[in-house]
Image (cartoon, grey):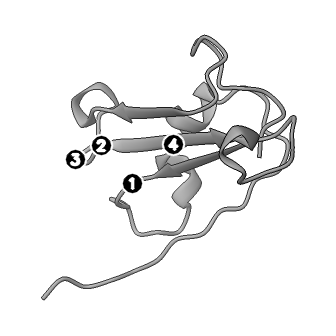
């Protein structure tokens, strides 16, 4: 949860960013999506930002793998972090 739009995005009501794997020294891209009250997903004055990727480490500290993206968000009002493990057949 943010109380501001993502910096350097022209104060956009919604943003989608893809951080390419070769620019963040990873095997997988990092994805950032951000929406605002314009989309009726949060109260006015708030923005919901979602950062996602595939974990490449052992999963012990997933936030370290997305720190580059978190740094782009500016001050974070409230943060919820979780990881899910799944298998592909």
- Nearer to us: label 2 or label 3: 2
- Labels 2 and 3 touching (C-beta < 8 A): no
Q: How many residues crowd mark 2 within 10 Å: few (<14), some (14–19), many (20+)?
A: some
Q: Secondary structure at mark 2?
A: loop
| Disc nearer the start of the sequence (4/1) | 4
- Disc number lying in front (3 or 4): 4
- Neighbours of disc 4 within 10 Å: few (<14), some (14-19), many (20+): some
Using the image, tell me which numbered label, if any, was put on residue 64: none
| Image quadrant assignment for residue 14 | top right
Could you say whether the residue bearing mark 1 is in a helix, strand or loop?
Answer: loop
The reply to whether callout 2 and callout 1 are in contact (CB within 8 Å) is yes
- Label 4: which residue? 33
Mark before the other along the chain sequence, 2 or 1:
2
Which label belongs to residue 53? 1
User: How many numbered marks appear?
Assistant: 4
Alpha-carbon distance for marks 2 and 3? Answer: 7 Å
- Residue drawn at x 61%, y 22% is 12
Q: Could you tell me which secondary element the residue under label 4 belongs to?
A: strand
Instruction: Tell me the residue that label 2 is attached to.
Output: 29
Mark 1 neighbour density, 10 Å: few (under 14) some (14–19) many (20 or more): some
* Label disc, if present, on residue 27 of the rendered structure: 3
Residue placed at 26% from the left, 48% from the top? 28
Rounded to the nearest angstrom, the CA distance separating label 4 from label 1 is: 12 Å
Report the Cα–Cα distance between label 4 and label 2.
13 Å
Label 3 with label 4: CB-CB less than 8 Å: no
Q: Nearer the viewer, mark 3 or mark 1?
A: 1
Residue drawn at x 38%, y 61% is 55
- Label 3 and label 1: CA atoms lie apart by 10 Å
Please name which of the two marks, 4 or 2, marks the residue nearer to the observer: 4
Q: Is residue 76 left or right of residue 59?
A: right
């Amino acid at each position: 949860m943010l109380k501001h739009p993502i910096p350097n995005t022209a104060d956009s009501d919604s943003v989608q960013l893809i951080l390419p794997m070769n620019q963040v020294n990873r095997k997988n891209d990092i994805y950032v999506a951000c929406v605002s009250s314009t989309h009726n997903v949060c109260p006015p004055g708030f923005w919901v930002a979602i950062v996602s990727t595939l974990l490449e480490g052992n999963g012990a500290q997933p936030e370290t793998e997305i720190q580059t993206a978190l740094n782009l968000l500016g001050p974070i009002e409230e943060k919820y972090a979780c990881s899910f493990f799944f298998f592909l057949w």
